[in-house]
Structure formats: structure tokens, C-alpha cells
Image (cartoon, helix red, strand yellow):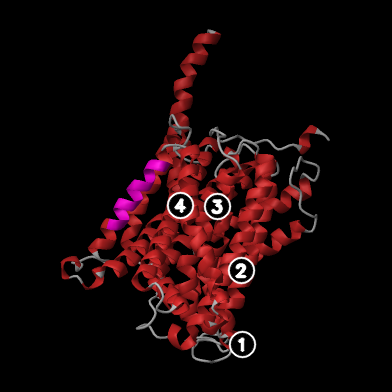
Amino acid sequence: MASNEELDYAGGGLKQETNWWGAFVIGLAGTILVTGIAPVMVTTLGASAIPVIIFITITGYLLCLLLAELSAMMPERTGGSPSYAYPAYRERWPRAAKHINGITAWAYWLGWFPVAPLNMILASAYLADRFNLNTTSGFTPIHTFIAWWTVIISIVGILLFFIPAYLGIRFGTVFATALAILSMVPLTFIAVAWIFHPSVAHWGQLSGFHQLDGTSFFSGLGGHGWLTVYIAYSFLLTWNVIAMEAAACYIGECKDPERDAKIAMNLEGAYGLFIYTLIPMAFIIVLGAKTLSNSALVDPKTIFVTFAGKVFGGSGGAALNWLIAAMLIVALALSALNAIMGCARSLHQMSVDGQFPRWFQKINQHGVPDRAMFFNVLCSLVVVLAGGAVEIYSFSNVGYTFSFLPVLVGYYLLRKYKPNASRPVRLPEFFKYVALGMAVLYFVIWLYGGIYYSKIGHTLVYYLAGWGVLIAYLPLYWYRVKVEDKREAAAAAPAVTAVTGH
């Protein structure tokens, strides 16, 4: 077709040293976030959470399919989802496109980097449970929001995961594969283990999808209407269940991205749908509303250990609890590794495109953006002090869900105005309307749901902090354009004069 059908974009310049398996296993970091959200949802909403979880997770699978098409169209772009917005807007609205690119990538970064501190906080909870640190007086927190042992474990863990991230995508894939096998096999087993122990499964707990107090699905919560409640909690869900899209961050580093995009994104979406559906259902069926509503019996941070004890009874005892805790810690470690690696690619690509300081363009000898990853580490160490999951969800999702709005609309624009552009992965034509519908849904969840959850969950301070970080894009963009670009132009001017003689 005519050349104007092809896309004009800048590549990320990272080494292409992995394949669909590398993108898939590192991207499992998004699926592992089930360890954080499933306990919160079932201990708050009970069985009524299940239809909401399934619905939002299906949109996450659809998002993976859309990103498979976009990533295969732009095989040299790095940074995943946000990097595909720029080419979609560039030709029709070039002045707006650069800001859309910048704010989308920055919002995505805000969505992903807090995963590392969150997962280290959750991992420390399992370690504390095993070592009884919560009752050890020597670890009593003094003038801190969280215990000292949580701070120490989180800092050490985040710094350690910078090492495989720094050593390149090939080493990172090997490291992630080991973590994936050690964590996802047992996590999958937990999702289905109750099927082989029918005596512990009580299907009646799902009947009618009642809330914890036995009221109906449509009864609302805490004086809030049912629809408001479910939209508000969908604000938490989108931060978690659509994170299976993380595999797209590494398609630009695949040796055969046009082939690998389809395989990696389909696998990621399908496995994510499986895990996010079965695990919360298992909690409801096995533990039941009465147990889930009793905070003395179930701590959301250690619910997997409680669940395993219920399924397997006395067999295994302490050894089983250690095994489950170790598996979850490894799973959380994999997710933390991706948080350091993945959104750093977005910052790098945004810098290459011209909307972020040049400092982030540097690639080390292993072919990865080491400065951007180190920036993630520093910011993660600060966010550890938030101390809890829902606080970090509220802070981080100000950026995350928002970052998909321009991408989904961009998919529609590319289908409408570039219908004949090369698409190694091509979805049915009606998917352009699916993308628009998802954009509307995510906008309502992001704005309406975010505001109401900050009230329901008492996280307004963290929600406003997220807005503060999102707005910080403006001075960073200003520094790049008004300071760095002008300085670069001034330095280049004498050289041009010397060559031309003018």
C-alpha cells in the first residue's frame, strides 16, 4: 500500500536478546499481583466480589490482545503499552501527540514502580508471620508508619533485585524463569487444590454472590449504593488484574517480535484470567463468609497460609505453612523485579522521544536503561514508607488506569486512519469499538471510582499524593524542552557555522 500507511516512530534501541518466553515469564509479575488484591476483595466484599473480579479481568485479557496487535505493528518500540500511543496521534495532532506520549508514559511509570515496594511489604508480612516478628519487642516500630523489620526487608530486597535488572534482559529472563517456576507452579496448585479435597469446598458460599454479612449483591456497603461500591473497588482491581499486560514491555527486546507478541500476550492474558478467577473463588468456597469477616481468623496479608491450612488440614503442618510462605515470597520477588525493569523502559522511550530528561536515555553495556531502573529503585525506597497495600493502590492507580486511555483511543485511531498499515497480528475489525468501550469504562473507574474509593478506603491523602506525582510531569518536560534541548541546540550551532563558513 501507499507509504503513508506505514507508521513513523523512533525505536528504543535496546538489545533484542529474548523471545516470547522471556516476555511471558517476566510479565507474570502482573499476574502475581493476585496475591495482593484477592485477599482485600474477599475480606471486604465476600462473594459479591467474584462477578466484579471476573468482569474486570476479562477486560485485562482483551487489553492483552489489543497490545499484541500494537506491539507487533511497532516491534522496535520499548516500554510496553504507553509507547504505542505516540505513533497513533503523531500525524494528525503532532503538537498534542508529544504531550500524550509524555503523560501516558509518566502515568504508566506511576502505576508500575510502586509494585516493588508493595510486594516487599507483603513479603515481609509473610516473613514476620513465620518468624513471629510482630510479637518481638526488639522490632517494635518507633515513630514510623510501619515496623522497622518491614523497612529493612523491603530496602534489602529492592536493592538486591536491581542486580539482575542491571545485568540485562537475557540474565533477567533466566532469573525470572527460575522465580516463575518456583512460584507460579505452587500458585497454580493452590488455585485448584481444593478441587481434589471436595470435603472442604462449600459451593453454597457462592450462591447469590452475597456480601460478607449475608446481604444481597445489590445491597451496597457502608451507606454507599451498590454501583458506587463496585466502581470504587474496581479502582483497586484495575491496578491489579489488568497488570498482566506487563509482558508488552519486553516485546521490543524479542528477537522476532512480530511472532513473539501474539504468543506472549495471549498466554499472559489467558493465564491471568485463570489465576484471577480461581483464587478468589477458592477463598470464598473454602474459608466461607463467616471466617473471612473475622479479622482475628484471617489476615489479608497472610491469607494464603490460612487457606492452605484449611485445605490440607493437619497434614504437613508447619512445614506446609513454610512452603506456602516461601512460594509467595518468591512470587512477590518476581513481581518486584519486573517493577524495576518494565516501566524503566517507558521512561527510556519517553526520553528518546523527547519528553523526558536526556539522563534517562543512557543504556549500559548490557543493553538496558540502567539509570531509569536506578531511578525506580530510589523512588521505591520512598514509597515503602506508605506501609500498606490499599494506600499504595490509591496512590499508584492515579497513573496506571489513566495511562491506558490514550492507548485504547489510539488503537481506534490507527484502525480508522491507518487501516492498511502492516499488522502481523490483526484482530477482527470490531475490536476498534471494543477498545473505545474499554476506554470509557476505564475512565469512569479511574475518575469516579478513584474519588469514591479514596473516601470509602480512607486513602484520600495517598490519592492526592498520586495526583501530585502525575502533575510532576510538567516541570520534567519543561526542563527537557526549555533547558536541555536549548543547550543542545546552542552547542550544535558553532559546529554548523564552522562547516558552512557562516
CA separation in Å, label 1 and label 4: 37 Å
* Residue 180 spot, x, y in % from top left: 49, 53
- Count the marks: 4
Inspect the image, locate mark 2, and give the three-letter code of the amino acid beneath it.
Ile
**Residue 484 located left or right of residue 318:** right
Q: Which of marks 4 and 2 precedes in the sequence?
A: 2
Mark 1 or mark 4, whichever is nearer to me: 4
CA separation in Å, label 2 and label 4: 27 Å
Q: To which residue does mark 3 refer?
A: 246
> Looking at the rendered structure, which numbered label has been put on residue 56?
2
Q: Which of marks 3 and 4 precedes in the sequence?
A: 4
Instruction: Look at 38% across and 47% down and name the residue there.
Output: 161
> Looking at the rendered structure, which numbered label has been put on residue 179?
4
Q: Is residue 299 above or below residue 225?
A: above
Mark 2 or mark 4, whichever is nearer to me: 4
Inspect the image, locate mark 4, and give the three-letter code of the amino acid beneath it.
Leu
Q: Which of marks 3 and 2 precedes in the sequence?
A: 2
Q: Which of marks 4 and 1 precedes in the sequence?
A: 4
Contact check, label 2 and label 3, Cβ < 8 Å:
no
Q: To which residue does mark 1 refer?
A: 207
Which type of secondary structure does the marked residue at label 4 adopt? helix
Q: Which residues, given as a range, are shown in magenta?
A: 153-164
